[in-house]
Image (cartoon, coloured by chain):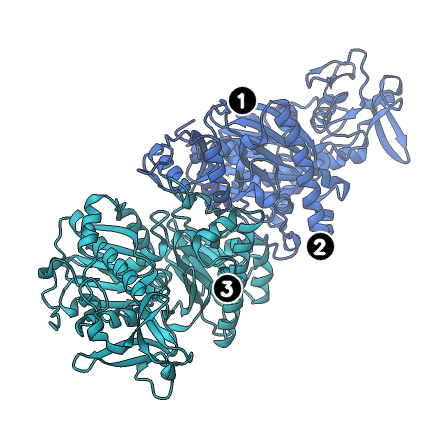
Chain colours: A blue, B cyan
């Protein structure tokens, strides 16, 4: 860790001033640090200079210095007493538009010390990004959006620091990964042009800031690394994700897919990278189906249907995040991965056909009509936590099929562009908090992802957060963020006739071309 | 100029955003600048990022960018419209404790455009540096001292810019040379420890600041270069002076002397540099003699005494700075160089002896007794602008002799330290505004400076200002400032028995050892 770090602490040996050595305080410190670093360049920001004389004298010239490296020069963050044995710490932040995840790390050991996640307080202004962009254009809107975000973040930082017994002045670095709009709102930059043709962010690579520039309550001199964006629709969260996946170090070509409202897809290897993003629809997040909801305690995550008797066996997420058959606890809804499972099981049980339509004779009395639309009762009222039946409507399935078709089409399109067959993919990384819950077998069954050996699929969890954390700890990882950004080719998805043809073909379960999904055995009922 | 500059302007070719090139605004600018600079590293301060999108759009992406270089990276100062044909300008400041001199320069041609000088407004708080250091320790004192200085400077900058038809935003750099305490007061740094053992400044090399850090009303992103100090008693003004002298590029050993209340002396060549500073007493500045004053209109600058009849011929400084015999205009006092001239002429005319005592029979009725002290009438009441006689007292001469002896002793001591005979000195640079007025022949006659061929003496004028200006314009000169600072050996003058012996021997005119001053022919009366 020590050698590869771009934020570090050293304890320079300083001899106190004397008539024989009346070097100025700051220069004495710089000289000591330079010596400690093996003669690398050292710079002290003017904002720090005033406070150094009192600090050095208070600590009797026995100090440790926290530093960060930029442009081949080490910049002083702060000095601390050499006594007391405090470490230096940093924060990695996944700056999501709905959820923020904050990770506290020990910068000297690399150890993850704690983690907390909380809702983005900007949701109270607008759940979706577009509403926030419009709000930002109002008088004082941008400042308000930034203010509530930084305010909430400061509260959480303070709690996290206190809980772990760390003074916030010892938090000397932060690494942030968010999408382009969220990054703008975090920095107080106007996102106005992000959603207007030709979709221009203010900045893609803001570089290193200081926490005092943003009012973040950690050490005021702490550098804040912002993961760079490729453009308005491919943000720093995905660049951090690519870093975390390690795909840029592998000879074999891999996919990295972040499943959400947008399907963000990267294909590549150590030699090249191509990315694209397209609307997959919110169905995959489970946020749209009538019984759909975000993953959480009591939410159905897995479904199994016995094809013999069409009996449903459901599993729900427990309070501790584990998944079990409900024992006493009644389900409240279904999340995205549960929906994918459910659709796959319905298809395998012959309860929906290859167009995703309910097969009445197979569904039996589970199928009811509500307001003229067919609904399948997944959980009867008496077994549901809401007291009402949890149902899946034909509309829900239609939405899911559009989403899965969009995803598959995007994967096909980007692979076609680089002249690679989907079968050649050696690794398929699934990113996002939603990723670990997806059952690849079910996703293959409905034709959302290619029919590759199951071991090809690797769930990476929160790759944005992991990437941000890596870049916080290691200089090579930080540099790689910017290399990835520069190296990546962004494919603008052209929704032309060819795309529409592919999309139409993918709107069947699993696909019109069954040879693409040899592993999916339809129950022939 | 262009190639050696560390502050420059380029006009990058930017293509406006389009769907085919939706690079973010800041990155588009950085990319354009990088290309224009031949792929050097470019960085944009966070403080600038917010304003760039509006500027780029206002100017239709046709901009010129002002940049400065630090740590092998070019930093954006600001963008301007590429139209309009404005240049970029900079300021060099000689930050004197009594007088400030401000020079406006064209950063692209190197041309000096204008210059203004004005009193240091801190004089109203304390004429001398020690009073100001004590005042700074009072509650709010430091802020007040800095505030009145910056306030006055801003007024003068604004006048200078207006007079030359330049918008202050086009002033994109500043270079400041001052002594250590003045530099601290300028930066708002506490000078408390400068005058207390072991005499430690807060900082010697503050590096580059931004004008916004100090509230200086030029372009807020303009870098401010502070000439580095060697220590509490050897300031950035002298380092800039060494730079301006060019002595560090010469094979032959030279002296550089700044004559003032402190005699600041540098000896060296391209291989080594040694410096010392010692109190020479205020006599050399003309500020102490009863008729003494700073050089200015109506002040006696040169005196000639006809040894045959002891008649005085005086010349005074005219309003335009030229020196002439007074025609109608009556003198108001005498400045330092006039005093040296007068003493030399008195000695050559036999009116003072080798101990500097008045020789009554040679002085005749010019010599009067006032309050028990002998005074020589230099200008009778009827010829004086004050209506009172301008006189030189025995006390004045005694003071001058102590000062000149101190100067000569310091020169001898530092030369002895490096084992060089004063005769080996090939160049003797005289710095300071006072320098050009000194008649080397007179200074040799009284034994203030060594008896070298007159062409050895070169007056350099305001070397601090010249050095600051050079460092503002050229990267190599800026780097050299810091090299000089690092290279210089500071000799702490030890007022021991040996020094006192040298001092005693130098308290004669020209010296007890007449062989040191072969050119000085005493009138043997």
Residue at image point 57% right, 41% down? A211
What is the number of the mark on residue A137? 2
Residue B446 image point, x, y percent = 20, 65
The number of numbered badges drawn on the structure is: 3
What is the number of the mark on residue B153? 3
Residue lying furthest top? A327
The residues tagged by marks 3 and 1 sit, at their Cα atoms, a distance apart of 72 Å
Q: Are marks 2 and 3 on the same chain?
A: no
Residue lying furthest bottom? B328
Query: Where's the C terminus of chain A, which quadrant?
Result: top right
Up-down relation of residue B489 to residue A320 (above or below): below
Residue A439 image point, x, y percent = 64, 23
- The numbered mark 1 sits on a residue in which chain? A
Q: Residues within 10 Å of mark 3 (few under 14, many from 20)?
A: many
Query: Where's the N terminus of chain A, which quadrant?
Result: top left
Up-down relation of residue B411 to residue A44 (above or below): below
Q: Is residue A58 visible?
A: yes
Q: Is residue B109 visible?
A: no
Up-down relation of residue B181 to residue B218 (above or below): above
- The numbered mark 3 sits on a residue in which chain? B
Residue B500 image point, x, y percent = 22, 48
Residue to which mark 1 is pinned: A455
Q: Residues within 10 Å of mark 2 (few under 14, many from 20)?
A: few
The residues tagged by marks 2 and 3 sit, at their Cα atoms, a distance apart of 39 Å
Residue at image point 70% right, 46% down? A145
Pointers 2 and 1 in contact (C-beta within 8 Å)? no
Up-down relation of residue B116 to residue A365 (above or below): below
Residue at image point 58% right, 53% down? A202
Q: Which of the pair B267/B92 is nearer the observer? A: B267
Q: Which of the pair A116/B173 is nearer the observer? A: B173
């Amino acid at each position: 860790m020590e050698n590869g770090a771009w934020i570090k602490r050293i304890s320079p040996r300083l001899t106190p001033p004397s008539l024989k050595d009346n070097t100025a305080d700051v220069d004495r410190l710089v000289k000591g640090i330079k010596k400690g670093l093996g003669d690398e360049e050292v710079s002290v920001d003017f904002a720090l200079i005033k406070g150094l004389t009192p600090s050095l004298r208070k600590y009797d010239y026995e100090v440790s210095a926290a530093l960060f490296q930029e442009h081949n020069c080490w910049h002083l963050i702060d000095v601390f007493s050499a006594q007391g044995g405090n470490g230096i710490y940093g924060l990695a932040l996944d700056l999501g538009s709905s959820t923020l995840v904050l990770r506290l790390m020990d910068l000297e050991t690399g150890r993850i010390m704690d983690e907390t996640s909380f809702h983005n307080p900007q949701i109270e202004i607008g759940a979706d990004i577009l509403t926030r962009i419009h709000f930002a254009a109002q008088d004082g809107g941008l400042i308000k959006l930034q203010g509530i975000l930084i305010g909430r973040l400061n509260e959480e930082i303070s709690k996290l620091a206190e809980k772990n017994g760390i003074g916030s002045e010892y938090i000397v670095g932060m690494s942030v990964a968010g999408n382009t709009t969220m990054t703008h709102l975090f920095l107080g930059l106007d996102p106005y042009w992000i959603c207007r043709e030709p979709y221009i962010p203010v900045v893609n690579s803001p570089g290193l800031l200081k926490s005092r520039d943003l009012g973040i309550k950690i050490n005021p001199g702490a550098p804040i690394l912002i993961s760079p964006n490729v453009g308005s629709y491919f943000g720093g969260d995905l660049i951090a994700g690519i870093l975390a996946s390690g795909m840029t170090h592998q000879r074999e070509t891999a996919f990295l897919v972040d499943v959400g409202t947008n399907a963000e897809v990267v294909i590549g290897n150590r030699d090249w990278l191509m990315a694209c993003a397209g609307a997959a629809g919110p169905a995959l997040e489970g946020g749209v189906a009538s019984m759909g909801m975000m993953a959480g305690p009591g939410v159905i995550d897995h479904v199994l249907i016995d094809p013999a008797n069409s009996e449903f066996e459901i599993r729900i997420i427990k309070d501790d995040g584990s998944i079990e058959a409900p024992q006493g606890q009644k389900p409240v809804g279904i999340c995205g991965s549960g929906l994918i499972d459910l659709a796959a099981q319905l298809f395998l049980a012959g309860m929906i056909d290859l167009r995703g339509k309910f097969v009445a004779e197979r569904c039996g009395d589970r199928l009811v009509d509500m307001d003229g639309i067919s609904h399948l009762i997944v959980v009867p009222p008496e077994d549901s936590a809401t007291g009402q039946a949890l149902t899946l409507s034909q509309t829900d399935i239609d939405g899911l099929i559009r989403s899965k078709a969009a995803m598959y089409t995007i994967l096909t399109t980007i692979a076609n562009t680089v002249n690679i067959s989907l079968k050649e993919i050696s690794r398929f990384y699934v990113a996002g908090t939603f990723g670990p819950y997806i059952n690849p077998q079910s996703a293959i069954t409905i034709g959302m992802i290619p029919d590759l050996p199951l071991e090809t699929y690797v769930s990476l969890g929160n790759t944005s957060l992991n990437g941000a954390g890596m870049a916080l700890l290691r200089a090579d990882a930080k540099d790689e963020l910017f290399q990835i950004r520069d190296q990546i080719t962004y494919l603008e998805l052209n929704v032309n006739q060819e795309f529409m043809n592919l999309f139409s073909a993918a709107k069947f379960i699993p696909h019109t071309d069954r040879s693409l999904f040899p592993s999916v055995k339809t129950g022939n009922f």
